[in-house]
Every structure is written in C-alpha cells, then in structure tokens.
Amino acid sequence: MSIHKHHFQIIKYIPGKNSLKIILVLIFVFLSIKCEKRIWDNPYDPDSDKSRWAPTTLVVKTLSASLCKLTWTDNAYNEAGFKIDRKIGNRDWKSEYGIVDENVEEWIDTAAVIDTMNYYRVYAYLANNNSRSIVDSIFHKYGRLYVPDKYANIQSAIDKADDGDSIIVSPGVYYENINFKGKNIVMGSRFLITSDTAYISQTAINGNQNGSVVTFKNGEDSTALLTGFTITNGFSDTFPGGIYCDNSSPRLENLMVIENIGGDGGGIGFGFNSNSRIKNVTIQDNDAILKGGGIICGVNSNISLQNVEIKYNSAPEGGGIWIFISNPKLNNVKIIGNKAFYWGGGIYCIDHSSPSLVNVTVTENTAIDSTGGGIYCISSNPNLINSILWNNSPNEIYFFKGPGSSSITVSYSDIQGGEAGIETSDKDFVYWLNDNIDTNPLFVNAEQGDVHLRLSSPCIDAGNPDPQYNDADGSRNDMGAYGGPNGDW
C-alpha cells in the first residue's frame, strides 16, 4: 500500500468554525487511503482480499515413477515468487517444500511417492506475506495400471497405457481378446510384483472362442512383456488360438497356454519376422486345424525358448512345433506326448529351417498316419547337442524323400536306434559327432510327463564336457531338458 504525501498536511488547530474543516480533512485523508488500498488491493497485506491474487488452474500430472509436474496460472502482481507445500497421504503438510521465482508457472516434484495420494498447494508470496493457495492432488500410480481396481477390464487398461507402463491384473477370469496395439508395456498378474507362481493359474484370460486370446501385430519389441497368466479358450480357424505374434517380438514368460484352437498355431503362432523370447512357459492341450499344435514359427521368426514345456498338443502337421524358414533356438525344452495326424509328431521343420536344440527332450510323440514321430525334416538342418529323442512313434527322425536335401548334426545326445535310427535318403547328410549314445535314458515316468533322469541314468554327466554346458551345480552336463546351466527348473 502506498500513501501520497499530499494527503498529509500540518493542520493548525482553529477552535470553533475551523473544527469542521479539520474533521473534513481527516475524512478525506482516510477515504484516500482506503481508495488507494482498493486500487492496488495488496494480496500480501493481511487485511486485503488475498484470493484476488492467488494462482488458479493448478494441474498435477505424472511424468515418471518419481516425478510429478505442477502447472498453474499466475495471477499475482509484483510477487517475489511462488511457494509449494506438499502432503503425502494422511501425513502433515510440509510447508515450503518447493519455491520458484516470480512469473514461473510450473514446478516438478522429483520425489513423488508412488501408490499413494500426493497433495500440493501453491501460493504467491512477497516478504513474509502469502496469497491464498490453490490445492490439487494426484494418486501417483505411474507405470502401474490396476485391473480391475482402476480399469474394469484388461483392454481398457492397455488402451490407456503408454510405452513403459505396467498393467497389474488381480486374480480372476477375464473373458477378453486383447491386443497390445503396438504398445511396449509390461502386463502381468500379481506374479509380476510378488513372484508367487500361484497367481499364474489364478489369473486367466479366456478368449471365449472368439479369436486369438492375445495379439501382438503392431511392431511390439522386446520391452513388451506378457507374464503370469493362463491363456485359454481362444479359437480361430485362420490365426493362432492362444497368442498371435506377427512382425512383433514381445517377451512371453511365466505363462500357461492351454486348451486353445487355431488355424495355424493352436497355442502360440509367430507369423513373419517375430523374434520373441519364450521362457518358463507351458504350452499344453492345444489343437491346430492345419499346422503347429503347440507353436508355429513362420518366416524369419527366430524365436528362442528356454525352460519351455510343449506337451499333449495336436495338429495334422507338427503336433508340438512347426517351423518354416526360421531358425529357432530351443534350450531346456520338453516336447512330450504331442500328436500329428500325418508328419512330425514332435517337430516339423521345412524349407531351410535350422533349429538348434540344446538340452532338449523329445519323447512319447506320435505321427499317427505317417512318419517322423520325433522330428520330420524337409530341406532343413537341425542341430542337436545334449539332447534326448526316445520312444517317439513310428520313428525318432525322418527326412522327406523328395526334392531338396536335409542334414542333421548330432553330438553328446541319446537317440533311440542310434545313427541308423535316422531315416534319410541318398541326398541327405547325418553328421554323427562325439559321444552320442543309444541307451534307455531311464526317465522317472515319461508317460506321465516326468522326464527327470533317475540316478542310474546313462545320460547323467554324459553331455558336452565344455564348461559352458555344465549343470547348475557345476558338474558335467546331463543330457536332456534338465541339464546345463539353466536345467534347474
């Protein structure tokens, strides 16, 4: 507040008639002061209307797990700056948590607290006086969208999410056919935040026989992750039933993909150029109308499988896995009890495919009306190390006797029937390398799916002696799915 000098005069007291003059002068001075105060209406004066100069339109937005950005409208005049107070949950307010200069209309909290209410109030200040404040709050859940707590279904959470976000899904059955829509997000059951495997069976996405259950076909890369679910009851007469990936390479981990039906790929289908990593996944009881009861690998889909179980799936071709112009890597994989009506009960590979099998067990698979119970090859070149093929019907490995040639490289593996058990033609090649055996591997109970080795198994400590293949306990590699550095699953 300012007071002009002309408002004050030295007034000589004159009794009588001059008393009225004195009173009038005093009234004029008082009114001038009040009028001047109203003209400026100092918001920092305790007697003024502080709300007039308070900031407005305060908005709080999340930037990251620890960052929240505040923006407001500056209505103050001649302020020194703005102060920000903060309160977390039910705690007390922390005054002057942040301070910015005059005319600034934003501020970033670099220590926002996740999964709770963050309250903020902003006000202008000058010296020791403050304007009125404006308050806003945010429930800070950056990177985590909760289903069904916040979003009624999974797809609505995906639609809201941005790259880098995580979606946490509580136990239940969700009747949906979801599409990641090109978003590189992490989506998991509560397994994602607890590592409790019970959540995998407790949290199911049920496709309700209305197409592929989960779709990735918009360029999702390896930062996209699906984990901790049961994927079931998908149906498509054209596309994969359970999970469909095309020109996308998401990670698929800690899943049960069961009882789906697809045209190509009953359980999981990889179309073109999909290089996904599949880890700790069970693919079971799926059916394909055409090819790949468990998995289908399309052109240039060089996927990698680790600690994966492919069992009791069926298809006309490739009951377990069907491979076309691609080079998948299988490490610590069990291919058990799959059926092909024609070719390739366990694995069918065609047209310059070169699958790598390291510590893989292929057993109890059947080609019902044709051949290649374990592996069926057309113009392909599989490579087997530390692996077991046993009791597949009608044979372990069969090469198509027609145009084109195939080869197979086998080392430190147990193949029923030995090298002579691999059925080839004159144009095919078998590279039968070091220390292969033809001896009953003595599974605990293969018919029931237990392919652990008994203590008396000839496959124990019979794998490649190179230290890179050593078992998790440091001993020499055991042949089969439970050998090698990742064999303790």
Image (cartoon, helix red, strand yellow):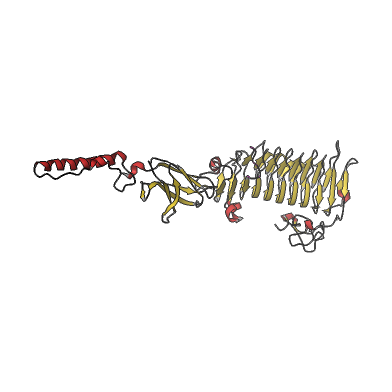
Q: Kindly give the residue lying farthest to the right in the view shown.
A: 426
In the rendered image of this protein, does residue 252 appear above or below residue 465? above
The total of numbered circles placed on residues is 0
Residue 174 as seen in the image, left or right of residue 436: left
Residue 482's x, y, as percent? 74, 57
Residue 100's x, y, as percent? 45, 47
Residue 15 versus residue 322: which sits nearer the camera? 15
Residue 34 as seen in the image, left or right of residue 476: left
Residue 394 versus residue 398: which sits nearer the camera? 398
The residue that appears at 63% across and 40% down in the rendered structure is 215
Snapshot quadrant of residue 177 = top right
**Dividing the image into 4 quarters, which one contains the N terminus?**
top left
Is 219 within the magenta?
Answer: yes
Q: Main secondary structure of the magenta part?
A: loop
The residue that appears at 39% across and 44% down in the rendered structure is 79
Residue 302 versus residue 236: which sits nearer the camera? 302
Is 292 within the magenta?
Answer: no
Q: Is residue 265 visible?
A: no
Q: Kindly give the residue lying farthest to the bottom in the view shown.
A: 455
The residue that appears at 70% across and 45% down in the rendered structure is 294
In the rendered image of this protein, does residue 455 appear above or below residue 366? below
**Dividing the image into 4 quarters, which one contains the C terminus?**
bottom right
Snapshot quadrant of residue 351 = top right
Residue 24's x, y, as percent? 16, 40
Q: Is residue 172 visible?
A: yes
In the rendered image of this protein, does residue 448 appear above or below residue 175? below
Residue 67's x, y, as percent? 52, 48
Magenta region: 217-223
Residue 28 versus residue 217: which sits nearer the camera? 28
